[in-house]
Image (cartoon, grey):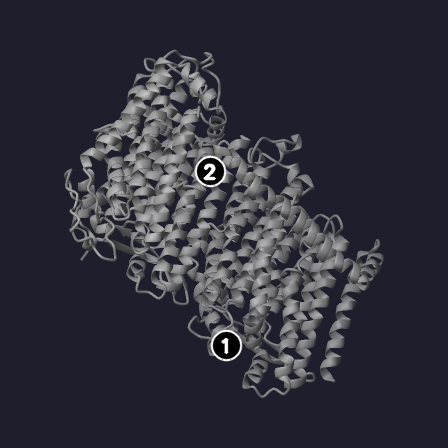
Amino acid sequence: MTPNLHLWLIPVLALIGAAINGLFGKRFSRQTVVAVALLFSGAAFAFALWVASQFSSLTTPHIETLATWIRAGEFRADFAFYLDQLSLVMLLVVTGVGFLIHIYSVGYMWEEGGFYRFFAYLNLFMFFMLTLVLASNYLLMFIGWEGVGLASYLLIGFWFTKDSAAAAGKKAFIVNRIGDFGFLIALFLMIQHFGSLDFAQVARGASPALPGGEALLTTIGLLLMVGAAGKSAQIPLYVWLPDAMEGPTPVSALIHAATMVTAGVYMVSRSHVIFEHAPGAMMVVAIIGTLTALFAATIGMCQTDIKKVLAYSTVSQLGYMFIACGVGAFSAGIFHLMTHAFFKGLLFLAAGSVIHAVGGEQDMRKMGGLRTKIPWTFWTMTAGTFAIAGFPPLAGFFSKDAILFKAFTSTYGSWIYWAIGVFTAFLTSFYMFRQWFSTFFGEYRGDDRADFHGHGEHGHGGIHESPAVMLVPLVILALLSVCGGWIGSERFDKFLAPAFHASEFTPVVQHGAMGMGPDTVVPATPVLPTGRRDVEVSETLLTGISVAAALLGFLLAGQLYYRRRDLPGKIARALGGFYETVLHKYYVDKIYAAVFVKPLIEGSTKLLWHGIDRDVIDASIDNSADGAREVSDAVRHMQSGNIRSYAGWVAAGAALVILYMVWVGTR
Amino acid sequence: MTTALDSTILSLIAFIPLAGALLLLIMPRRDREARWLALGVSIVAFLASLHLPVHLVRSQAGFQFEINRQWISNPNIHYHMGVDGISMWLVVLTTFLTPLCVLISWKSINDRVKEFFIILLVLETALIGVFTALDLFLFYFFWEATLIPMALLIGMYGHGRKVYAAVKFFLYTMIASMFMLAAILWLYAKTGTFDFGSVQAAIRSGQLEGFAAAAPWLFLGFFIAFAVKVPLFPFHTWLPDAHVEAPTAGSVLLAGVLLKMGTYGMLRFNLGLFPEQSRGNAPWIMVLALIGIIYGALVAMVQPNLKKLIAYSSISHLGFVVLGIFSFTQAGLDGATFVMLAHGVSTGALFMLAGILYERRHTYEIAEFGGLAAPMPVYATFFLFIMLASVGLPLLNGFIGEFLVLSGAFRARALYGVLGATGVIWSACYLLWMYQRVFFGKVTHEVNLTLADLDGSERAALWPTAIVALVMGVAPLVWLNAIDPAVRSALSPFTQLASKVVGR
């Protein structure tokens, strides 16, 4: 007998919180709103911890079915929840980081209007995100998938009177919908070929032995990747995420860094069986991940808005996770997902604390020298910065290193992924320390208008440290960013192994200089995802190179943004057009607007509406059907002034028709 | 006991509104009482209609609650009514929306109030008749009977070019119905009966003289009448005009129920009587449906007028229904039926919401609004919720039907499913953009700063739609359990036709 853990309660707890605050929060005091929001998100976290404590006694995957949701003919989808090592990790990250960010938000949002609305949305997000990670079939996952998109839409547009915020929310939703379109088609293919959307059934059905096997699985894999690219902001659908920074900063931390945007990585990992049999799809995933990581990092180098730097950094780091998935190192991807949730959540919250301190300013050019004024924020942000840059022994070092190593050595890997990954690591370190130096070192460059209202968010004067309610989550996340990687990628790998097919799992050789000899048997098809390529390479060497890249980035940033602050401007001028291009984010938004948005709107207006609807269809009816028009004129006359006679005419007409009909019928 | 009620319940439901209308007719002209009476009568009809889902035997195929009496002996016309799991829900949809129409007209109709409610109740009777009639003559009778009250609602209580719109609506659908009439009369001439079951049996027996040659034309005769009503591209241009000028209650019933007469007719008569021709014509019909989905959405996107936007979105949504019906898959037809109901609820609600705005500003121009979320937060929240239902957010009603339709269409022909699925992108585009322009940003027109939020009767009209939208999304089985068996029996002739598969 496997125990019934009532997993459904975890998301529903968050939903109850959302419902209470959403329906009645307007009449509550701020304290009551906070109590409700924290109680239910905290309860979800506590429940998750309890589930984790019970985990060892379960046979995985542990599935609990609550009720049937949809049934149509043969097709069926249940409200069923799925717990294995993978969903447990996600569950703990989402509830844990989510709860911390709830606490932080109490301080950050205290002065804001719509306080209850904010927490209702935040709890609603938790509900959908938990549904997403606990679902036992793709359709239930899709509820969460779309639902987090909704929460994201609502929270990006939280300050809805601001046009840019409203536009950003809409953009996020629509771009995500483009991804969802791909996801949906993948679901239809699964229904058609596997007869079910249950993870277990799909995994059983997904075999190259199917008719059209590999081609089918490749198609499904690519379509899933379209969905993942939308949700996880990968090329070419990443454009919504930087704009999403219009939302309040805790939202950026929770949704647009730590949890929601990683849903694509989770979904691809959850579908590992499909990808393992579709090397072509794997390659596309790896290439998209690599390109996105590099591309976003270059843009991040030129951003001056403290949140925008972090946004592009998130896009770039998500790219790393997709590299991991694309080379079959799913557990390394999830490892990075987890550590990234810690340090990027931390970085956003710390950035929020900086913004809070300087009265709503987000432009780093107007910061500087804040180190001594907001020490708690400084030290925690330092932990996050070193962690993301990949300095040992911080969390980011372990997870990024694991990805880069696998990118090089996996059977699906290539030195190109690795090389670009390392170069991106250098860029990452550079732009993060650029931010660190610009914000905390040198002279304060603000105009002392610390009461300036960037979002209308903050109204107190003077540069000041944030209240304890904001600092405590920062400190906890800082500790996690430091220690979160100490479990080590091998142990993490082993823990997740059952979720990624225990039988096919081969432990990775742990120590350096252990490359397989040329005569080692490379497994035949199906290729093992964690298998190793036939390469001679020392892990120590690879690690050394990536640490050196991080160090180089640090030194360069220090040189440019601490010692010689005159240099960046000169370099920018020297680079000229290239710098301009990167500064304008490669003009991608403008290109999309010109190529897709504008033609669509103008075409719909001029060609479809005015052209076809009005000038072709209606005109042909009005003109050729002269009789009809005359009748209409005639009726207009009848109508003139006397509505009853009009009604009488209509009734008489109808009666005539019926009489005629009866007459014809009796003939 | 129940058996006696079972055979009279449909007549009761259908004629309670008519009886109410007659009562109104003889009543003295007092507006307040007319409103309350109309509300009471329509609620009683709704409660009576709940008998159907409660007592329908899910496991039993075919029509239930049947009543079959000779009406006219020559020609051989029967008063034959009955419902299956599909039409039953359409009846309930009609009785559900009518009280809401009364509520939403509570304050907005101030002139000729009594007549308004009489027309509304007569319309309700006719609509219920359409969905329950199992005699082709009776069906045609009710079908045409819906035209007059609807045209009157638009022509008398509308605004702007109301007479033009009413006449366009009337002529368009009237002329199209003539083709159906001709087809019905041909069938009567050959079979000597208007009875749906008997005609169907005669056709299936293969003994009907001259049927093979006439069948394509008969199919088209029915189809054109239905396609104009749906409306299917390119017969759709009457709809935006009719909606824009119609009073709110007229729009709600027009979009919520009248359009479904077309899709219901296709399902019942085109598929039921002419399975082979349905198969044969499916490819181009599905193409028209797809054009409707995409074209309707794109034109909706660029409408400057809120009500026209919703009207074009209806064309898009009804395209899903037709796509599902002509996929001949279980999921497709289940989904198509579900979309009919879901669209009735959420688009009905959208028209009510548009009407509420019109009451306050006497315009539907989107540019006249902006930033309304600040002065009208409750209204904005209802609008958001219904918009999300309409956009197909899972756990709300729009998703279930669209998902099933698309998976069915995908099974029939992958490309159709893929093209139809682009609808999820378009619907997000036109609705979210509209929502942004109406509700977000700063209030740009000073007059909008003081707009009143929802009042009691408006809330009373909107709450039921929001709740039903949610329940339909969370527990669709309540509906699907009845729809699924009915669809299975509707599809049974097609499994025999499997050798002549056109799709795929």
The quadrant holding residue A237 is: top left
Q: Chain of mark 2?
A: A
Percent x, y of residue A400: 27, 35
Q: Is residue A453 above or below residue B396?
A: above
Q: How far apart in space, not on screen, are marks 2 and 1 (Cα)?
A: 47 Å
Percent x, y of residue A206: 31, 60
Residue type indicated by callout 2: Val
Q: Is residue B113 at all visible to an observer of this figure?
A: no
The quadrant holding residue A572 is: top left
Which numbered circle lies on residue B500? Answer: 1
Q: Quadrant of the C terminus of chain A?
A: bottom right
Q: Residues within 10 Å of mark 1 (few under 14, many from 20)?
A: few
State the residue in front, A29 or B37. A29
Q: Residue at x 44, y 75 (%)?
A: B60
State the residue in front, B369 or A271. A271
SS for dot 2: loop
Residue type indicated by callout 1: Lys
Q: Is residue B57 at all visible to an observer of this figure?
A: yes
Percent x, y of residue A417: 32, 40
The residue identified by callout 2 is A239
Which numbered circle lies on residue A261? Answer: none
Percent x, y of residue B93: 55, 60
Q: Residue at x 40, y 32 (%)?
A: A312
Q: Chain of mark 1?
A: B
Q: Is residue B10 above or below residue A453?
A: below
The quadrant holding residue A190 is: bottom left
